[in-house]
Image: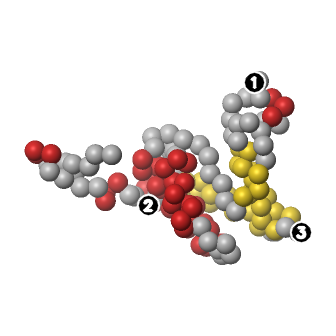
Amino acid sequence: MNYSNKEALLGAMLVGGWDADKGGQVYGIPIGGSMVRLPWATDGSGSTYIWGYLDAEYKPGLDRAGAERLVATALALAISIDGSSGGMARLVTITAAGAERKLIRGDKVQQFWDAVEPSKPGGEGMVVV
């Protein structure tokens, strides 16, 4: 769909699903339209901020609770630094039984920006990146 409409569309997709032969699967489909099966995938404006976190923290064989925790933390990291990543997390867990949706309201999303010391007069404690 992306590739055949590349003149009119500008967007990447993440596709996830479940089948009886291969179990859970995730595919990343970048703007160019190639389709690559991956152990995990991320895209969108906040993805650049969380790529290293996901790369370091993803472990094959995660159970459902661990996978949901990983995704919720990754989304919270993106939300804390990227104004376009929204203020809440919507998770969809896909299993052989179907898809289950979970909403984490904004006031329940883990906060990360409180770890940075505020700037003090004279520049002490200032963080420059």
Q: Which callout, 2 or 1, points to the residue nearer the camera? A: 1
Residue 25: x %, y % from top left: 77, 61
Number of numbered discs visible in the structure rendering: 3
- Among the two numbered marks 2 and 3 on one chain, the one whose residue lies closer to the N terminus: 3
In the image, residue 79 sits, relative to residue 20, either above or below, namely above
Residue in the image at 55% along x and 48% along y: 47
Residue 77: x %, y % from top left: 46, 55
Residue 8 shows which numbered tag?
Answer: 1
Circle 1: residue type:
Ala
Residue in the image at 62% along x and 51% along y: 42
Q: Nearer the viewer, residue 116 or 85?
A: 116
Q: Nearer the viewer, residue 56 or 77?
A: 56
- Among the two numbered marks 3 and 1 on one chain, the one whose residue lies closer to the N terminus: 1
Circle 3: residue type:
Asp
Q: Secondary structure at mark 1?
A: loop
Q: CA distance from mark 2 to mark 3?
A: 36 Å
Q: Secondary structure at mark 3?
A: loop
For label 2, the crowd category at 10 Å Cα-Cα, with few meaning under 14, some 14 to 19 and many 20 or more, is some
Residue 101 position by quadrant: bottom right
What residue sits right under mark 3 in the picture? 21
Residue in the image at 59% along x and 67% along y: 58
What residue sits right under mark 2 in the picture? 110
In the image, residue 20 sits, relative to residue 75, either above or below, namely below
Residue 18: x %, y % from top left: 81, 63
- Among the two numbered marks 2 and 1 on one chain, the one whose residue lies closer to the N terminus: 1
